[in-house]
Image (cartoon, rainbow, N blue to C red):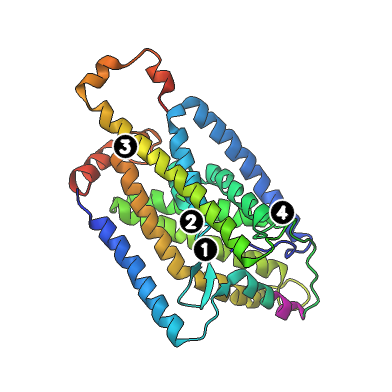
C-alpha cells in the first residue's frame, strides 16, 4: 500500500522527490545503455516490469492484522538489473495506480518511489549478492532477497509517515519512534505473510527463467555459469 | 523435471489460504486496506487537524470499477510474462534442433531479442 495522495505535508513530499529523482535519472541512463548494448535483454526487462504489475495489483488479506495490502514484485527486477533500473520499472506501476486507481498519488510519488522502487530493491539486491557469495542455495537466496525487499519497502513507508507525523508538535527521536511504532504496526506487520508469498512466487519465476533462458542471466552477471549448470542438472 | 519448488510454493500458498479462511470465519476483522488504517493513525496523531494537501486527479466511481482496473493491471502483467516466457521457451527449443542452424538467415541475429 502506498502513501495516499495528499497525505505528506511540506517539506516531506519535496524531500522524497529530491532523493528519488537522481536515482530515477540514473536508472533511465543505465537502462538505455543496457538495452543498447544487449538488445536480447529487452524481453527479460519486460517480464520483470510485468511481474511488478501483477504482484502490486493483488491486494491480499493478511492473517496477522486482518487488513489487506499488496506485495511489490520489485525483487526480481532488482536481482536481474539492480536497484536503479527497478526504480524506473516501479515508477511505471506507481503512475498507473495513481492515475487510474486513486491508489498512491502524484504528490506522494517521490516517497512511494523511494520506498518501493529504491529501498526495497536495494535490500533485495544486497541480500542476493551476499547470499550468493555465501554459496547458499540459489532459490533460497532469491526467496530471502525478494521477501525482505518487499518487507523493507513497507518499513520504509512507515519511516516516511513517522517522519511526517511524529508524536508531539516537533520532530524528536522519541516522537518519531512512537509514530513509527504505530505505522509499522499497520504496514510492517500486515506485510509479513505477504512478503513470504512474494518470496516464494519470485523463486518460482526465477526457476523458469533459469530453465529456458539461463544464458541471459549469466550475461547479466546474475549467475555464474557453474551455478547454472548445477541448477539445471540437479533441480531443473 | 523435478517439481519440488512448485510443491513448496503451493504448500506455502495453501497454508496461508487455509489460515485466512479459518481466521476470517472466527474473527470479525474487516480486511480493509492498510492505507486506510494509516489514515486513521494520522488523524489520531494530529488530532484530526491534518488536511490532505492534494486530491487524486480521478477516483474510480465505485468498488466494482476499482476491481476492474486492478484486474486489468494484473491481466496486462500476466499477458506480458506469458508471452515472453513462451517466446524464450520456444526459441531455446528450436535452436537446439539440428536443421534450425542451416535455416538461420543473415538477419537472424538482428531480429533475435
Point 23% across, 39% down: residue: A229
Give how far across and how far down residue A48 sits, in percent.
46, 45
Q: Mark 3 highlights which residue?
A: B89
Which residue occupies the foreground of this view, A202 or B22? B22
Viewer can see residue A97: yes
Q: Mark 2 highlights which residue?
A: A55
Spot the residue most to the top.
Answer: B106
Tag shown at residue A106: 4
User: Mark 2 touching mark 1, by CB under 8 A?
Assistant: yes
Query: Which secondary structure type mostly characterizes the magenta part of the structure?
Result: helix
Q: Earlier in the sequence, mark 2 or mark 4?
A: 2
Q: Earlier in the sequence, mark 2 or mark 1?
A: 2
Point 49% across, 63% down: residue: A151
**Neighbours of disc 3 within 10 Å: few (<14), some (14-19), many (20+):** some
**Neighbours of disc 1 within 10 Å: few (<14), some (14-19), many (20+):** many
The numbered mark 4 sits on a residue in which chain?
A
Which residue occupies the foreground of this view, A13 or A207? A207
In the image, which residues are magenta?
B42-47
Q: Real-space Cα distance between discs 2 and 4?
A: 21 Å
Eye-nearest disc, 3 or 4: 3
The numbered mark 1 sits on a residue in which chain?
A
Q: Mark 1 highlights which residue?
A: A70
A56 over A21 or under it: above or below: below
User: Mark 4 touching mark 1, by CB under 8 A?
Assistant: no
User: Mark 2 touching mark 4, by CB under 8 A?
Assistant: no
Pointers 2 and 1 within a single chain: yes
Q: Quadrant of the N terminus of chain A?
A: bottom right
Q: Real-space Cα distance between discs 4 and 1?
A: 19 Å
Q: Earlier in the sequence, mark 4 or mark 1?
A: 1
Point 57% across, 55% down: residue: A116
Amino acid at each position: 500500500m502506498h502513501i495516499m495522495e495528499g497525505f505528506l505535508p511540506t517539506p516531506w513530499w519535496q524531500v522524497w522527490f529530491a532523493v528519488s529523482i537522481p536515482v530515477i535519472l540514473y536508472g533511465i541512463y543505465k537502462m538505455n545503455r543496457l538495452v543498447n548494448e544487449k538488445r536480447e535483454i529487452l524481453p527479460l526487462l519486460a517480464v520483470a516490469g510485468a511481474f511488478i504489475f501483477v504482484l502490486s495489483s493483488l491486494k491480499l488479506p493478511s492473517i496477522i492484522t486482518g487488513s489487506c495490502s499488496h506485495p511489490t514484485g520489485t525483487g526480481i527486477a532488482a536481482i536481474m538489473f539492480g536497484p536503479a533500473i527497478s526504480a524506473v520499472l516501479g515508477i511505471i506501476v506507481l503512475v498507473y495506480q495513481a492515475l487510474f486507481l486513486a491508489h498512491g498519488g502524484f504528490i506522494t510519488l517521490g516517497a512511494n518511489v523511494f520506498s518501493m522502487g529504491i529501498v526495497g530493491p536495494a535490500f533485495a539486491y544486497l541480500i542476493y549478492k551476499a547470499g550468493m557469495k555465501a554459496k547458499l542455495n540459489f532459490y533460497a537466496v532469491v526467496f530471502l532477497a525478494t521477501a525482505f525487499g518487499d518487507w523493507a519497502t513497507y518499513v520504509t513507508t512507515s519511516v516516511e509517515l513517522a517522519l511526517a507525523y511524529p508524536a508531539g508538535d516537533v520532530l524528536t527521536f522519541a516522537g518519531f519512534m512512537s509514530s513509527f511504532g504505530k505505522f509499522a504496526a499497520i504496514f510492517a506487520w500486515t506485510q509479513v505473510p505477504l512478503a513470504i508469498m512474494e518470496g516464494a512466487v519470485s523463486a518460482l519465476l526465477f526457476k523458469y527463467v533459469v530453465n529456458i533462458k539461463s544464458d541471459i542471466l549469466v550475461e547479466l552477471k546474475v549467475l555464474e555459469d557453474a551455478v547454472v549448470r548445477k541448477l539445471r542438472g540437479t533441480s531443473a | 523435471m523435478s517439481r519440488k519448488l512448485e510443491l513448496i510454493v503451493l504448500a506455502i500458498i495453501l497454508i496461508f489460504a487455509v489460515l485466512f479462511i479459518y481466521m476470517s470465519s472466527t474473527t470479525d476483522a474487516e480486511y480493509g486496506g492498510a492505507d486506510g488504517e494509516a489514515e486513521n493513525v494520522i488523524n489520531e496523531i494530529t488530532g484530526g487537524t491534518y488536511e490532505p494537501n492534494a486530491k487524486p486527479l480521478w477516483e474510480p466511481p465505485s468498488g466494482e470499477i476499482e476491481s476492474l482496473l486492478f484486474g486489468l493491471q494484473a491481466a496486462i502483467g500476466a499477458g506480458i510474462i506469458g508471452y515472453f516466457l513462451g517466446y524464450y521457451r520456444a526459441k531455446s527449443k528450436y535452436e537446439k534442433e539440428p536443421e534450425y542452424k542451416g535455416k538461420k538467415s543473415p538477419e537472424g541475429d538482428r531480429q533475435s531479442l
